[in-house]
Amino acid sequence: MKYVFAQVVFIALLVGCSTPEVAEKSPFTGNPWPEIRTERIETLLPAAMGDHEMDAWMVICRENNNDPLASHVGCENAGGSAAFMFFLQEGALTSIAISPSGEATSLAETEIMDEVIEIARGVGLWGSVQAQFERFQPSKIAINTGRTPIADGLSHTQYTSMINGVDPVWTNRMISAEPMIRSWLSVKIPAEVEIMRQAAEITARWEVEAYAAAIPGETTDRDIADFLEAKMAEMGVGDGWAAEQNPAVNSGKDRGHSHPTARVIQPGDFIQTDFGIRVYDRWVTDIQRFAYVLAPGETEPPADDLAKWEAARAGNRAAFAAMKPGATGNEVDRAQRVLLEENGSIPVMWGTGHPVGYWAHDSGPGLSGGRLGQELRVSPTQILKPGMTFAFDGFHSWQLTDSTTKTLSVEEMAVITETGAEWLTPPQEDLILISSN
């Protein structure tokens, strides 16, 4: 078994730095999103609409409290209410924006949409919207209502206005866009995968460096989080999720998604760091790294503690092996839960994994629903496809002496390929060891 000794790494870093430390240069410069968005609309949206037999999709945009998908279709700068409409006919997509004057000029210049229809300010949308329905004659019109916040962007006021402003012949054809949105957002084009791959490498590396600076009996969980927050500020990247809980550093009992505390790390601790960064203000990562604090004189963890780590790692690898095109999320979840039971873990409440990309918990099939003793319920929305990106765990949990629990959740990131899955960054094979000597 090979180990990474944090103190040794830290000393090596110090020895190699004979000059003041130079800030790490960010590789995330420029703005690749406009080109990527165009490609996503042209290549992935028609397929997603066709798969769900939706021949029209309408997104209503507005200033301030905008639809969560506004920037994905190009209406992030809406002032007055605007309608972005997509019509699929015989596999060909036509995109139309209906916008008040002023914003309409800018939209036409950006060439995001095939057509821009300008309406006078103060004039309602719905007459122009209905004219497009009459022009294209869609049989199923998808609108942004659904159970998940990402797909539920149409406000109650907007919905009521639409129902009152559009003839029932069209409103009666309206259905939730949620299944289509899930399919569209869950698949990333190669350029996006490469961005996420680069961000994942940085995320994992910084976590290792944070452990390298840790000193048993002195360093707190908060100190480790401060190290990572300083790295983010230095490079100019954002938080993968709520800043108060990113990174989540925990050397004690289970606390779920929570803020790091002033707990001082001690020999015998497993330290969990759950960390994600946001790059280009668009794509996020979600990776965990684990360290173990050795007692004075120890060179490796006690056999029982090492076995717990190896069990959690094995669960992660079982999930990875099950991730392939055509598999379902609950099959992936079931694969690692079998090992949970075989390795003597107590049950865990969390699913094995989730999509990650535009949000830490992105839209797409969850890797969950595979609890032992329950029937797997297969749904078409759960099928894994090439280009989907996931963060997923291998668990091992046990009860502490105070009746609380401690869980190892070995979390990695991967992308589905044509033949299976591929790591976005090399996975953690061995515990990072922090010496107390």
Image (spheres, helix red, strand yellow):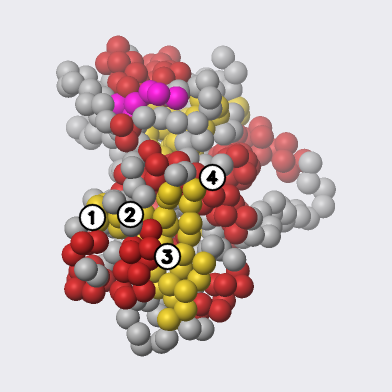
Q: Residues within 10 Å of mark 1 (few under 14, many from 20)?
A: few
How far is mark 4 from mark 2, CA to CA? 21 Å
- Looking at the rendered structure, the kind of residue marked 2 is Pro
Residue beneath disc 4: 43
Residue beneath disc 1: 173
Q: Element under label 1?
A: loop
Residue beneath disc 3: 84
- Looking at the rendered structure, the kind of residue marked 3 is Phe
Report the side of 162 relative to 181 (left or right).
left
Residue at point 40% right, 41% down?
50
Mark earlier in primary sequence (3, 1): 3
Residue at point 73% right, 36% down?
12
> Could you tell me which quadrant the C terminus lies in?
top right
How far is mark 4 from mark 1, CA to CA? 25 Å
As displayed, is residue 71 above or below residue 224?
below
Q: Main secondary structure of the magenta part?
A: loop
- Looking at the rendered structure, the kind of residue marked 1 is Arg
- Nearest the camera: 16 or 242? 242
Mark earlier in primary sequence (4, 1): 4
Q: Element under label 2?
A: loop
Q: Picture quarter containing residue 232? A: bottom right
Report the side of 335 relative to 437 (left or right).
left
Q: Picture quarter containing residue 341? A: top left
> Does residue 261 appear in this view?
no
- Looking at the rendered structure, the kind of residue marked 4 is Thr
